[in-house]
Amino acid sequence: MNNFIQSGRLAIAGLLLAAMPLVALHAQDAEFKPVAVVSVAPVKKILADVQYLADAAGQTDAGRMAALLSTPFTEGIDKTRPVGVVVMTNGQEFAPTAYLPVSDFDKLLTTATEQIGPPQDVGEGIKMFTPNQMPIFVKDAGNWAILAMDQEKLANPVGDPTVFLKDLPEQYDLALQFFPGNIPEIYRNVIVEQMKTGIDLSLEQEADETDEEFAVRKQQIADQVAEIERVFTELEDIIIGWNVDATKQGTYLDIAYTGAEGSEFAKMMALNSDLSTEFSGFTSSEAAINFQGTQKLSEADIARMDKQMNSVREQVIHQLETEGDLEGDELASAKKILDLAIDTLIETARTGSIDSGLMLDMTGGKGTFLAGAHVADGQRVEDGVKELLKLAAADGEVPPVKWDAETYQAIRLHVMQIPLDDAPPEAKDILGENPEVILGIGEKSVYLSGGNDAMARLKKAIDASIAGSDTKVGVVQMHVAILPILKGIQKNAPKPVPGVDAAIEALSGGADKFLVTVDMEQRYMRLRMMLEEGVIKAIGAGVAAQNAANAEADANFEDAPAF
């Protein structure tokens, strides 16, 4: 049966491919739409940003060298306007063209001739270069030079690419924008059918896998393919853009989506355009590690999560039963823990809201972990923790827990003392002489703290969360601050580490974070990953110092007397 299905899909894909030339005969006069746009910022901005990065990394001369080396390749190009590539389609064929901003077309031709050889004049203001026997056609269009691999594509090109580039050159040094809905349906069908066929051909039932489990795994993959298919119908565009921004003191990569009007993606984005958190006290811009995640879930999101979590449950149970590491009561306990955890996730999703915050604070070299999250049933979480401790106790000694040690703001606090009798002095310095791990259970919330002054810090975070319960947030706000982490390494290293010492010195000016944010508004969503300037400085200084130390060590080794 599987072979029959695979053969059928291959046949469908083949028929679709065979049909393309026939359908193309009817698409001669169809309207062209963009499928992809590539935007490159003006040369002037690119070189300025390269110099900024070089300066930040302590490699100023490298930035100057880049500017010098670029000169022969940019003669005749207007360095104040962007470069663009536009891929158009009329529903059947693709028409890619590139656009170079021109200040002097003849100089541009001379520059190209020096690099790839002289062109041939093919008429109508078009020149043909043939590097590596591959034709490239160039048309003089006033203040633009238009390039194509096919001369016919230059017959009616887009006159001004900025119509499609829009504000991409101002937002990013380099950007790629896709319009998945404009990919011709016949090509979409081929892509999907070939994907399904490839999966069917590679998917095999494992020796210890039952028919039911194999069916579940196949369904998971089918669901993933369905999610990919949604991209073609539910996303208006996808933008991947990289930029260097001296005013924001860093460099970042964006991945952004615009949902098609009325689509599930658009509804999800609109649903999350105005969010607030109940756990603002558990995040801090000064923390070494900080995470806040808040999201409202649609009915479709809840259904997908329900299905995914139950699938995970089945897979993990199968793994527990077949690996044989746990038996009898221990296996039953592990299954119970899994059920409690999965049920908590599913029931929390069914409330239509996910909300959490956590941080690792290392101020003054002292370490404290704090976390808080919304759950559907706090008691279920407590039951799961008790079962987990019971299972752990079967393998060794577990510190005792003082259940219901106290109640604060209607939250029951359970306390575990962490013995540090045999711990090194450095651990006591970071965590305190008598560190605690505290589990807080509310009716619809759960809390965790540990380390130095854990109880007082937890109560302070709870109070701050109550006071700031209407704090506006994005979907995700996360950062990792490099300086406090490096200081911790420096303090506890048995001997000086030159790279770490140099990186800490470079970070003295601040801006030491790696940040990840996810924001949504109406039909738009953006994921941003950013490196602040200080991190770039630290990387440059650290690598240079470590290389110098290694070179010195090698030299001393070579000069050492032989015995």
Image (spheres, helix red, strand yellow):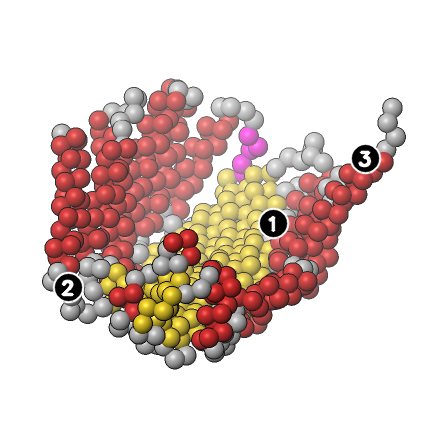
Q: Which image quadrant for residue 8?
A: top left
Residue 121 image offset from top left, x and y in percent: 36, 69
Circle 3 or circle 1, nearest the eye:
3
Q: Amino acid at mark 1?
A: Thr
- Disc 3 versus disc 2: nearer the observer: 2
Q: Residues within 10 Å of mark 2 (few under 14, many from 20)?
A: some
What residue is at 47 percent from the left and 52 percent from the top?
Answer: 372
* Residue sitting at the far bottom: 142
Q: Which mark is residue 368?
A: 1
Camera sees residue 238: no
Q: Is residue 399 magenta?
A: yes
From the image, tell me which residue sits under label 3.
Answer: 557
The disc placed on residue 134 is none
Assess whether mark 2 and mark 1 are in contact (beta carbons under 8 angstroms).
no
The answer to whether residue 494 of the structure is visible from this angle is yes
- Vertical arrangement, residue 479 with respect to residue 493, above or below: below
In magenta, the rendered stretch is 398-402
The residue closer to the viewer here, 28 or 498, is 28
- Disc 2 designates what residue? 27
SS at circle 1 = strand
Q: Is 105 displayed left or right of 533 in the figure? A: left
| Kind of residue indicated by mark 3 | Phe
